[in-house]
Amino acid sequence: MSSRSRKSLIYTSILIVSLVTRLYHLDSIGFVWDEVLYATYSKDLFNTLFTGVNLEHPPLLKLLLAPFVTWTFSEGIIRIPVALISALAPLLAYLIAEKLYGDLIAVASSFLIIFDVNLMAYSRLATMDALLTTLALLSTYLALRGRSVSASAALSLAILTRFDGILLIPILALTGFLEHRSHKKLHKDLLIYITAAGLTLIGWLFWLAFINKLNLLFAHYSTITITNTYPALLAETIYKISPISIALIPFGVIAPFLGGSPIPILAAAMWSLPRGILPYVGVRYHLYSIALIYLAGLDGLRRVQRSITKSRKVTIALAISAITVNILISASTYPYLISYLNPWSSRPILYLSDSDLGQGSALREALQKLDDPKIVIVNYAPHIVRIYLRSAKIYSVPPLMNYSKPELSALELRTGSYFVRYIVSGKDWFYDPIIEELAGEGLIVQTLNRGGQEVVIYDLSRKFREGEIKFWLNAAKIAWSYFRPGIGVSAKTGLNYANQWWHRITDWDLASYLSAIISARKLGLIDEEEFEARVEKILYFLETRKLTPKGIPYLSYNSDTGEPATAMGSNPSDAGKLLLALDSLKSFRPSYKERVKEIVRRNGMKKIAIDPKAWRTTCGAYAHYVATGFKKFGLAGYPHIIEKLRFYQALGKMELIKSHGADLPKAWITYEPILLEVYELNHTEAREFLRRLIEASKLRFRETGHLSAFSEGSIEDPPYYVYEWIVADGLGTWVITDHEGRRLNLTEVIYTKVALGVYAYEGSDYGRILIDEVLPLTMTENGFYEGIREDRKPIKILTDKTNSLILSIALYRLVELQAIKA
């Protein structure tokens, strides 16, 4: 093999192994503290550059991250640019060592660097440390080759990565001098490096002055105090650096006395020792030195070994042994690589916290265990928590990173409220007296341990949960009180009343009553005997009632006699609602299955299903809801019903109409059918659509002050029954119509069932405002009134539909709260 081919093979091998170890499974650990800051600043790079955010660090890293952060905010993507550049560090170390010591030391040191636990770890993070190390090695190699101008360019990039790159000035000048032994070159190189560094710093300072932020930079660095951190530096060496690096330090020191080049060990000393008087402690500040120690140490080891035996095989064996140790160390600590508790450390070293790469992973693991988090309080890295929990409200104790400290007296600690407490060596990472109060309020649901780290998760909603359970049980009891005989149920027939004055029922009303009975039994409001007695009266009525000449139910019946109250026949909406209730009954009590099947046949449900003309009377979410009832009984295989069942798929293709900043589909949209699908059918797509409707209502409230809880229901004046539409196709938004779709100029109604449905869905400030406004005026000993008008006058009508839906909402919420089984 030719010399050139051999070189190419070595270069390729180093690069491939380096790239694999740097790029493999980059998301193996969670974000660390600085990564999220740099990535966040990079995402809005224009604002960062013009507002001087994070001005204590120059912009190069943020410029590199910007395209990747714009693409996606994930660990595996954001870390790619630094990992790619840092993969060049072992090759640069090879080139330096090859020039100073020859091939054997060059190859061995490059692979030691590839598998070094520190260099590998920081090369896999979107932080400045590995990037600066790579640029420092590049500038050193160029200075060694006598390319001062190119080295000065690399120096400028290093300074634009982090200001301590300025330490390279004497290192590069000394490197050129020791290699070429020319005082003239030393003076010339110093001038070049000082000029390059000066122009770089002046350029950055000029920019900060231009955006009027220079004073902030000086204010930041004026807080730095000279101190003695050499003990920490010693501890860093003992606890954090690979034992191979530690073992090679004395060999690197004696190498120049045995004829070796002093450049690497002097450069390492000039890079690391000045840091002992600064308050910056962390192995990440010494990566450049660690890389150079491998070069100098291996050369010194070889020279000592040769004084004993000149065997090349012994040199190779020593190098392979050292590489193997580094591989085993990195493998044993993967994926964290560096953590508080190194494999050879018996306890955490608090002042070496800056070297811990496991904190983000511990937080990520903890946050993944939270069940539907809505409020999260942390005592560490709230900005990291925000990345993993974008929809939650984040608080910090004490206040950190512009995140506020919660006022517990004003905090609604509902379901989904947690305190994530980060503890190191038995002490809170950041302490605040409120921590003990939070711990006392909460219930520990998870404890995660890793080395000296402990993450304790407290569920803060325990007391809130108890209050919520009482609230919803009380709401259910009030709603059920409507269905007492003589109030909302006929004492003669056992059939329900549509409202306390209109003693008639449609099949929709009857279905509402049947659903209410099932909910009441599940909630324990009635016993099995009463449940069976009430159901029996309904089933008997359905098995014996008179039907139209077409063999379908009449539109309405007299509740006190069971006789038809009109000559009109029923419709798909009422029939579909009844089918849903009957399906719920046979699912809850399979013993009714055969009777239900016969009732469906007897009442001509198939005749209603096959009539396309009848289905023109319903559309949108209403049609989807009732079509689901026909689907439950295998009666939905007709084109006009299949079309109705595609409502949610069609939403994305509908023309949009804008309302107070919200984009809504141009259709007939109101809360009623969506609430029914969410709380009776637990329909996933309906839940998402409900969220959109709530957001639209919130936006309207913010702009106009109107509390919006649109639905359908009874009112006390003509036309006595109205429909409120969030969107009315062809009529606009926030429209009231009668049953024929004619627009009405009436005061809006805030419906009780919608207020409770919104509150149950998210318990937001808006939901709380709704129930605070509505419930005090609508709760009665005989059930809930329909709602209130905007002037806060209650609509004193009690209906089966409102109270039945409230029972369904209460049941759904109590199952969520795990107060009862589904």
Image (spheres, grey):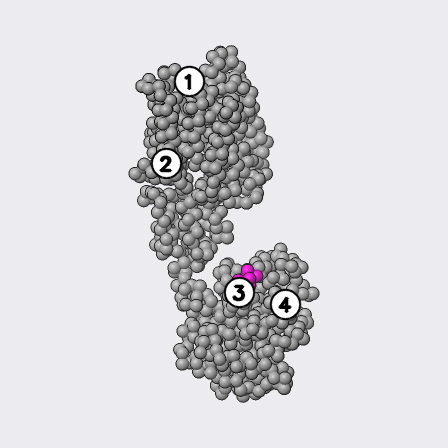
Q: Which disc is residue 261 wearing? A: 1
Confirm or deny contact between disc 1 and disc 3 (CB under 8 A): no
Where residue 29 sits in the image (x, y, percent)? Answer: 44, 43
Residue 685 falls within the magenta-colored stretch: yes
**Distance between mark 3 and mark 4 Cα atoms:** 18 Å
**Distance between mark 1 and mark 2 Cα atoms:** 29 Å
The secondary structure that most of the magenta stretch takes on is: helix
Q: Residue at x 42, y 72 (%)?
A: 523
Q: Amino acid at mark 4?
A: Glu
Q: Amino acid at mark 3?
A: His
Quarter of image, res 347: top left
Which residues are drawn in magenta?
684-689
Between disc 3 and disc 2, the foreground one is: 2
Q: Which disc is residue 683 wearing? A: 3
Per the image, label 4 sits on a secondary structure element best described as: helix
Q: Residue at x 53, y 36 (%)?
A: 81
* Residue at the disc numbered 4: 643
Confirm or deny contact between disc 3 and disc 2 (CB under 8 A): no
Front position in the image: 558 or 308 = 308
Above or below: residue 167 compared with residue 351 = above
Between disc 1 and disc 3, the foreground one is: 1
Q: Residue at x 61, y 57 (%)?
A: 662
Where residue 117 sits in the image (x, y, percent)? Answer: 40, 35
Quick one: label 1, few (<14), some, or many (20+) residues within 10 Å?
many
Q: Looking at the image, can residue 526 be seen? A: yes
